[in-house]
Amino acid sequence: MGTIRTSDRGRAGARDIAVWDPLVRMVHWGLALSVLVNGALTDEDGIVHEWVGYAALGLLAIRLLWGIVGPRPARFASFPPSPGAAVRHLGGIAGGDRTVHLSHNPLGALMVYNIWLTVAALCATGIMMGSLRFFGVDWVEEAHEAAFSWLMISVVLHVGGVLFDSRRSGVPLARAMLTGRKSVPADRPVV
Amino acid sequence: MTGRDPQARRAATLAALIVAQGLCAMFFVGDVIADIGVDVAESRFHLPLEAFVATVMIFGVIYFMIELRRLLSRMAEMDTGLRAARGDMAGVIERFFDDWELTPAERDVALMVLKGIDNETIAAVRGTAPGTVRAQCTRIYGKAGVDGRAQLLSVFMEELLAED
Ligand code: HEM
């Protein structure tokens, strides 16, 4: 994609570039909601907890398919997992580089894959706990707990990263996840 | 999800359908997983039937995804065409530069090339050697997938002359 609309939302000299299509946004907020609901609201042994878990797994599966089929910013190829690139990105930040990434930046990309893997592990261990074979097996339950703790840490880091990068790059990222458009200050180079 | 544009609304509807159908497929798959190894009393067709339904639904999801992908790229193209028609060539040019992932220096040079300024002058304006400008041009043409100045221009002429 990459559709541009020049500053029709009032920010002088900003380009609005379409990056997150509706499916990416629905999956994001659906996944965030299901993590919140299952982490805080549902009864851990109840059927609702199980359903919400399956819903999260379904959303994840949809997103992974969309990572192959979807438009450019949503595709895995736009944010490959690369620790090297992430380290270089950190160096760039320290050096005052203000490049704006239309998809996830290399550091954000690592976090995205981390969250997806963790959610997958949570769902897998959750399904195992409900199965006859692994019912009541200690290590499965411990793995489920550990994955949840790690997901909480990751989400805190994720939201922190979003807030930090919004300030650094001058692009309101959370708004982009709502409206689909990144509003990029005119003087910033875009990748 | 902006309400005004009917195409944006269609895209949002398609996305919602994909999510709904994907979740339904997930629940069937979940049921299949839960049933594997369990002696299902109902009938021995239960499991294969569920597996079949899940497969059909997954293919449906993929089909809708391809549709949505097409719709989204049509929307992006239409937007470019509209801007060109409105005379917003600057916006169109920016979009292409973004797509080609030009560096800030390359954008500068590319813009001057489009304005018909020759390499010597570009070098003088930017305070670099003519060789540098030539190298930058080569990289720009490479990223844009064109052979040279004339073809670079024609990329934008095409947008202006596009019928739909
Ligand atoms: C449980 C809570 C959350 C989870 C599991 C989660 C997970 C994710 C994932 C997986 C992505 C990648 C999206 C994709 O490519 O499909 C993402 C991106 C994003 N999330 Fe979240 N998220 C959560 C909460 C939030 C919250 C509360 C905010 C608001 C501040 C937020 C803002 C964003 C933004 C802005 C992006 C795009 C970042 C970029 O521009 O590169 N997320 N999130």
Image (tube, rainbow, N blue to C red):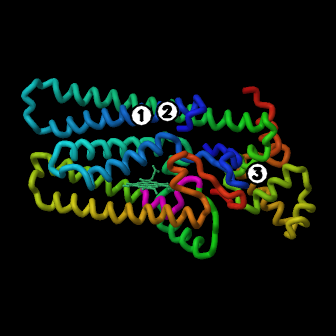
- Residue placed under numbered mark 3 in the picture: B141
Dot 3 and dot 1 residues touching (CB under 8 Å): no
Q: Secondary structure at mark 3?
A: helix
- Residue placed under numbered mark 1 in the picture: B18
Residue type of the residue flagged with mark 1: Ile
Residue name at image x 45 percent, y 42 percent: A66
Residue name at image x 32 percent, y 53 percent: A36
Residue name at image x 72 percent, y 27 percent: B164
Residue type of the residue flagged with mark 2: Ile
In three-dimensional space, the C-alpha distance between marks 3 and 2, rounded to whole angstroms, equals 31 Å
For residue B83, side relative to residue A131 (left or right)? right
Q: Nearer the viewer, residue B91 or A185?
A: A185
Residue type of the residue flagged with mark 3: Tyr
Dot 3 and dot 2 residues touching (CB under 8 Å): no
Boundaries of the magenta span: A102-112
Q: Secondary structure at mark 1?
A: helix
* Numbered badge on residue B66: 2
In the rendered structure, which disc, 3 or 2, sits on the residue that comes first in sequence? 2
Chain letter for mark 1: B
In the image, which is nearer the foreground, mark 3 or mark 1?
1
Q: Is residue B79 magenta?
A: no
Q: Residues within 10 Å of mark 3 (few under 14, many from 20)?
A: some
Position in image of residue B163 (x %, y %): 76, 26
Work out whether disc 2 and disc 1 sit on a shared chain: yes
Position in image of residue B162 (x %, y %): 76, 30
Q: Quadrant of ligand 1?
A: bottom left
For residue A17, side relative to residue A76 (left or right)? right
Position in image of residue B69 (x %, y %): 53, 35
